Amino acid sequence: MIPVVDLRAQYQNLKSEMDAAIEEVLREGSFIRGQACQRFETEFAAFCGVSSACGVANGSDALFLALKALGIGPGDEVITTPFSFIATAEAISRNGARPVFADIDEKTMNLDPRAVASRLTEKTKAIIPVHLYGHPAPMEDLARISRDRKIEIVEDAAQAHGAEYQGKRAGALGDVGCFSFYPTKNLSAAGDAGIVISNDSTLVERVRLLANHGERSRYEHLLEGVSSRLDSLQAAILRVKLRHLNAWNERRRQLATIYLQELEDVSELRLPRETPGCRSVYHQFTIRTKRREALRRHLETNGIASAIHYPLPLHLQPAYASLALEKGSFPVAERTAEEVLSLPIYPELSEHDVRQVAKKVRDFFST
Ligand SMILES: Cc1ncc(COP(=O)(O)O)c(C=O)c1O
């Protein structure tokens, strides 16, 4: 079976480096916010081109804490895409604010700036663009909307470590950037981990406080917070992997190019296209077809796994029934959710396997 992602491959290739890093943490015995955490924060901030970073327990908390640090709460509205993982919207509702969805752009599957503009109210405090599948959202247009209105841009960069927009890296494009290091991500931990980054060091220090019970010094709590710290073992593993991230992203791009070449003339398919000025890191290689279910079955019969990101837009999830948004509210997101299919892509995947997947996709549409 060709899997969608192989979570054992990185350890097989980096075993000695990773074992040494883990052993160092175990010997040191500082397991939460230890030296490895501080080093990783510095290195990841530099990688993204910002001044500050605070490691947290996961990407969901990164978003939740970024909004909390910005003072967003009950009575506030935050605009985001309905075509994302639920954590994006949960970060808003967990703070007591209201998620306001805006439809996506047909071509990029990211937020449509015109739809965002139409959803603005006096209560809008932030916009959360998601760089879906590793492709940057239209940040310039969103900046134009938020400028002069005191609306913060909180990037959900959980799928976009190293992606670039006009030469700047994802996470460094808005007011604050949030990342997940969930095991399937382009940069991944051996468990849960996340980070908040910004050029606003005061904001990042507020996240640091909130992520550790509002504690300034031992048992002195300036405010009520949560327990959401990065642990040293994850940070040590992330430090090793960060050194390989550029090469891994480059490899993903090479594999994506092969898919694009091999599938170019399949007229029934819509392929992911880079917007000018954007550099995708192909967290997913997601195609669109009206015959998705049949294609998925055909691939499975031929030993090829695929995945659907995401089958149901957020506004139609039972969890958001209270928003009373019916089918038809966001037609582009709804149509896209019915058509998307993610093909295998990860740095260790061989070119031979990519060509094999592409061939089976082509065979399906030629019969
Ligand atoms: C777009 C997006 N946002 C947020 C998250 C949440 O990250 P985590 O699973 O680390 O909490 C994820 C990944 O799982 C994601 O893909």
Image (cartoon, helix red, strand yellow):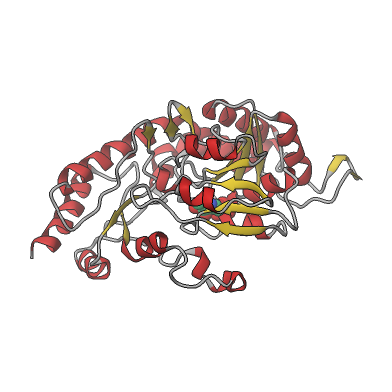
In the rendered view, tell whether residue 82 sits above or below residue 128: below
In the rendered view, tell whether residue 198 sits above or below residue 295: above
Residue in front for this viewpoint, 338 or 147? 147
Total numbered circles: 0
- Is residue 117 shown left or right of residue 291? right
In the rendered view, tell whether residue 238 sits above or below residue 43: below
Residue 203, position in %: x, y?
Answer: 72, 35
Residue 332, position in %: x, y?
Answer: 38, 59
- Is residue 19 shown left or right of residue 35? left
Q: Look at the image and tell me in which quarter the C terminus lies.
A: bottom left
- The image quadrant that residue 348 belongs to is top left
Residue at horizontal 26 percent and vertical 66 percent from the top: 292
Q: Look at the image and tell me in which quarter the N terminus lies.
A: bottom left
Residue in front for this viewpoint, 122 or 239? 122
Residue at horizontal 64 percent and vertical 35 percent from the top: 148
Residue at horizontal 63 percent and vertical 32 percent from the top: 198
Q: Can residue 287 be spotted in the picture?
A: yes
Residue 277, position in %: x, y?
Answer: 37, 30
Residue at horizontal 31 percent and vertical 63 percent from the top: 339
Q: Can residue 57 be spotted in the picture?
A: no
- Residue at the left extreme, as displayed: 367
- Is residue 262 shown left or right of residue 59? left
Residue 221, position in %: x, y?
Answer: 89, 45
